[in-house]
Structures are given as structure tokens and as C-alpha cells.
Amino acid sequence: MATIMDGKALAAEIDMRTANRIQRLADQGITPGLVVILVGKDPASQIYVRNKERRAKKLGIHSIVRNLPETISEKELIKIIQEYNEDPTVHAILVQLPLPEQINEFHVTMAISPTKDVDGFNPFNLGKLLINKTDQTPIACTPQGIMSFFKKYQINLDGKKAVMVGRSTIVGKPMAALLTNANATVTIAHSHTHHLSELTREADILIVAIGVAHYIKAEDVKPGAVVIDVGMDRDSNGKLVGDVDFESVEKKASYITPVPKGVGPMTITTLISQTVTMAEWSSEKNG
Ligand SMILES: Nc1nc(=O)c2c([nH]1)NC[C@@H]1CN(c3ccc(C(=O)N[C@@H](CCC(=O)O)C(=O)O)cc3)C=[N+]21
């Protein structure tokens, strides 16, 4: 049976360190500020917003949620982002994805100042990640949270075969860059990939972010693999489940993340710790 990687426990451990850093900033009169912009009513985004509000409050960072109507224009949204770019009490801006179709995601990520881009979606920050120059560079929170699992459970990536299923800007691409920078041999698979299960069966490290409930079964997994499930899907009873069929894969993998209490809480912890890091960067620059 695989070791279950407990995202809730690891998140609590990291939050404790973050709390100390928040205290040090408070001693200098600085409160880390995070703005979350939610356009419309995406269900996964609502879970995310609710949970991160709770954690932000508990830790004492200043968190604002801007709920905007589904019908807002791209121009109006960008104007609001620019106001937060200029606001010195705001260190981190997150625009929840997906956005309604009248709004171009690329234009929005371009509008967020690279120094406040806590998701690391701005092309400048993505470019720095790609060339492995990540000093003072915010990096997407879900992939970074996954790297924290590897560190905690002492999973060596050097020379390992890693397969990333999913090529999104929010998970797949930054994850592949982080794994490459950590000397893994990385394959990105996606909806056009032929013979997917032949690839996944070769993976020492298998990361799945495709958004289909229980898509990866035991037969798709190499014995002893490390399996990371990024999925936030609903089963036929409306219960939150992952992209991996946990029950069967657990018997074959060496390590596995559950859903819930796996990757999700780590995304939030990373968001909060990165907000604090960005407040630290800004105080170094101004102090
Ligand atoms: N710009 C942007 N960045 C994101 O990182 C982003 C986004 N947009 N849009 C929506 C998705 C979804 N997402 C979640 C993160 C954590 C949980 C989470 O806390 N899950 C918990 C709790 C689940 C529950 O409360 O039922 C768990 O898995 O244990 C859920 C969903 C981040 N996303």
C-alpha cells in the first residue's frame, strides 16, 4: 500500500512557518495584502476562495475578495487590476480562472504587474521560470505546492521519468518546468496524446491534471510510482473526487495524494506563503 501524502498536515506545518514570517513583517509595520478577483460563479473557484479566506484570516494577512459580475467587460476588469497594481497595501493579485468568454485571459495576465502576480501567470514570470532564473519570481501555486510534497517526503527527482498529464498554464506547463529544473526527464501529455496509458505506465512520477473523475486506473500506473492527483472533479453523487482512481491506484503506487486533503490545501498554503514572500521582497526594495 502506498504512503498517503497528507496535504492538510503539510499545509499546517508550512502555515506555522508562514505565521512567524508574518510576525516579523508586523514588527516592521507591514501587513501582507492579497486581492482575489472572482468574475462570475465558477464552482471550483468558489471552493478555493472560501478556503483561502478562512486560512488568510487565521494567519492575519489582509485579504480582499472582489466579486465582479459575469458580464463585466475586459476593459473594466483591466482598469480594476491597474488600480491594485498602484495600491501599495496590495502585494499580491490573483484573478480566478476560468474567466467568462468576453474576457481574454492573456490580456488579463499581461495587465497584472509581474511584481504582484502571485499566480506566476504573467509571461515575464513564466519566462523566468522556463530559463530557471527564479530569484524574486512568483511561481504558480499548485505546482509549487506539489514540489513541497516531494521535499517533505524526500522524493528524489534527479534523472527520474516524470509524466505530466495536462498542459495548462496554471498547472501542466509550470509543473513541467519545475520538474525539468529539478533534473527529471519530463514528458507532457494532453488530450491529443496517442497511447496515453503506455506513457503513464513508464512514469516514476505521475502528475495528473485533466479534470476527468477517476480517469487514471491501477493499470495505467507503474508499480511503485509516485502519483500526484490535481483533479477537483465531482462523482455521480456530487462528491469531490480526483482524476485518479484512488482506491485501486493506492495498492500499486509507493506514494499518492488523496482528494480532498492533498494538492488542494497545498495550493492555498503556497498562495499565502508566496503572498508573504512578495511582501518581503517589496519591503527589501523599499527599506
Ligand atoms: N488563478 C487561479 N489560480 C488557482 O490556483 C485556481 C483558479 N484560478 N481557479 C480555480 C482553481 C481551483 N483551485 C482550488 C484550490 C484549492 C482547493 C481546495 O482547497 N481543496 C480542498 C478542500 C475541498 C473542499 O472544501 O471541499 C481539498 O482538496 O482538500 C480547491 C480548488 C485553485 N484554482
Image: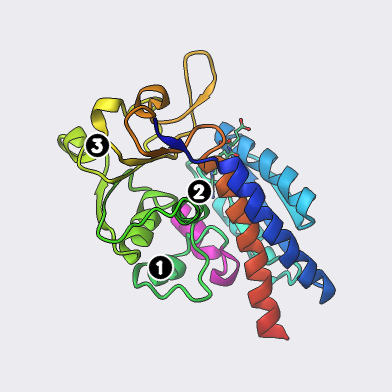
Mark 3 or 1, nearer chain start: 1
Label 2 – label 3 distance at C-alpha: 41 Å
Q: Which mark is residue 129?
A: 1
Question: Residue 83 appears in which quarter of the rendering?
Answer: bottom right
Q: Which mark is residue 244?
A: none
Q: Quadrant of the C terminus?
A: bottom right
- Magenta highlight range: 103-117
Mark 2 or 3, nearer chain start: 2
Label 3 – label 1 distance at C-alpha: 29 Å
Residue 263: x percent and y percent? Answer: 51, 42
Please state which amino acid type lies under the numbered disc 1.
Leu
Q: Which residue is nearer to you in this view: 139 or 258?
A: 258
Q: Which mark is residue 103?
A: 2
Looking at the picture, the colour scheme in use is: rainbow
Please state which amino acid type lies under the numbered disc 2.
Ile
Q: Which residue is nearer to you in this view: 161 or 279?
A: 161
Disc 3 + disc 1, Cβ < 8 Å? no
Task: Mark yes or no: residue 33 visible.
Answer: yes
Is 130 magenta? The answer is no
In this figure, what is the number of numbered marks?
3
Pointer 1: residues within 10 angstroms few (<14), some, or many (20+)?
A: many
Note whether 127 is above or below 284 in the view shown: above
Disc 2 + disc 1, Cβ < 8 Å? no
Q: Nearer the viewer, mark 2 or mark 3?
A: 3
